[in-house]
Image (cartoon, rainbow, N blue to C red):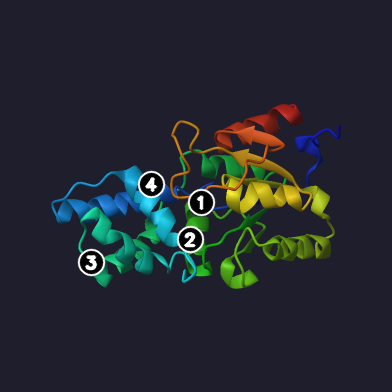
Amino acid sequence: MELTKSLTEFKYMSFDVVGTLIDFEGGLTTCLQAIAAEAKVTIDSEEALSLYRAARYSENADLFPDDLVRVYLAIAPKLGLPVEEAYGIRLKESAKAWKAFPDSAAAMAELAKNYRLIAMTNARRWAFEYFSEALGNPFYAAFTADDTGTEKPDPAFFHQVFDFVAKDGGDKADILHVAQSQYHDIGVSRELGMTNCWIERRHAQKGYGGTIEPAQFTKPDYHFTSMAGLAEAVRTARGN
């Protein structure tokens, strides 16, 4: 059985951004709860995320987070919220203020000392710029849905990153792919022969929240419940 590579052997770390580094579920539900309060109704955050997930992953979906306008109009009636496009636009625009998880920025700053960090996000470039700023702009390179013309889990997204790394003097084997989504990242990265690291952000919660459930669970090479856990493991591996 082939052993997982040591954390000291990688030159690059590639990251899912929304859900792994940026708390998109918190950002979505905070905005929806504010709209609900104004409308004098009560909503359940987990129900809202479940409805979001069902509406988001449809055949007529647009790029994220622009698609939140359409998604809002689809879920608002089921939550008892006002069905008006202005509120959908408000939900989309809320992405500009979504917060990084409390451990993300510090962990990324630490990891950037030893690795070249690559963002791989299904978000559009305009939104990524806000996310990157919230994280302290730690990235060596960034690939968005605008750049790739596709979204994960499409292998084509990953192959564009492989091509970039090859031109940079590296190889696919030099990358550790870090993500929270089994569906978008962990499964396909395994199929493509990458070493991967699962950040299980919802370890204390049931279900998959706002992320689509995978057809099957993929056991990752590395598994942490936070970015702080990964950073600590790197320190230990490097003897720091």
For the residues labelled 4 and 3, say whether their Cβ atoms are less than 8 Å apart: no
Judging depth in this view, the residue of 44 and 162 nearest the camera is 44
Marks 3 and 2 sit apart, C-alpha to C-alpha, by 20 Å
Judging depth in this view, the residue of 229 and 34 nearest the camera is 34
Q: Earlier in the sequence, mark 4 or mark 2?
A: 4
Name the residue at 22% across, 56% down.
35
Marks 4 and 3 sit apart, C-alpha to C-alpha, by 22 Å
For the residues labelled 4 and 2, say whether their Cβ atoms are less than 8 Å apart: no
Q: Of all residues shown, which one is farthest toward the front?
A: 215
Q: Amino acid at mark 2?
A: Tyr
Q: Which is more foreground, mark 4 or mark 1? A: 1
Q: Which is more foreground, mark 4 or mark 3? A: 3
For the residues labelled 2 and 1, say whether their Cβ atoms are less than 8 Å apart: yes
- How many C-alpha atoms fall within 10 Å of the one at disc 3: few (<14), some, or many (≥20)? some
Which quadrant holds residue 218?
top right
Give the SS element for disc 4.
Answer: helix
Give the SS element for disc 3.
Answer: loop
Which quadrant holds residue 219?
top right
Q: Which mark is residue 26?
A: 4
Q: Earlier in the sequence, mark 3 or mark 1?
A: 3
- Look at mark 3 in the image and give the residue it sits on: 83
Q: Which mark is residue 143?
A: none
Q: Up-down: is 103 above or below 186?
A: above
- Look at mark 2 in the image and give the residue it sits on: 57
- Look at mark 1 in the image and give the residue it sits on: 212
For the residues labelled 3 and 1, say whether their Cβ atoms are less than 8 Å apart: no
Give the SS element for disc 1.
Answer: loop
Marks 2 and 1 sit apart, C-alpha to C-alpha, by 8 Å
Q: Earlier in the sequence, mark 3 or mark 2?
A: 2
- How many C-alpha atoms fall within 10 Å of the one at disc 4: few (<14), some, or many (≥20)? some
Marks 4 and 2 sit apart, C-alpha to C-alpha, by 19 Å
Q: Earlier in the sequence, mark 4 or mark 3?
A: 4
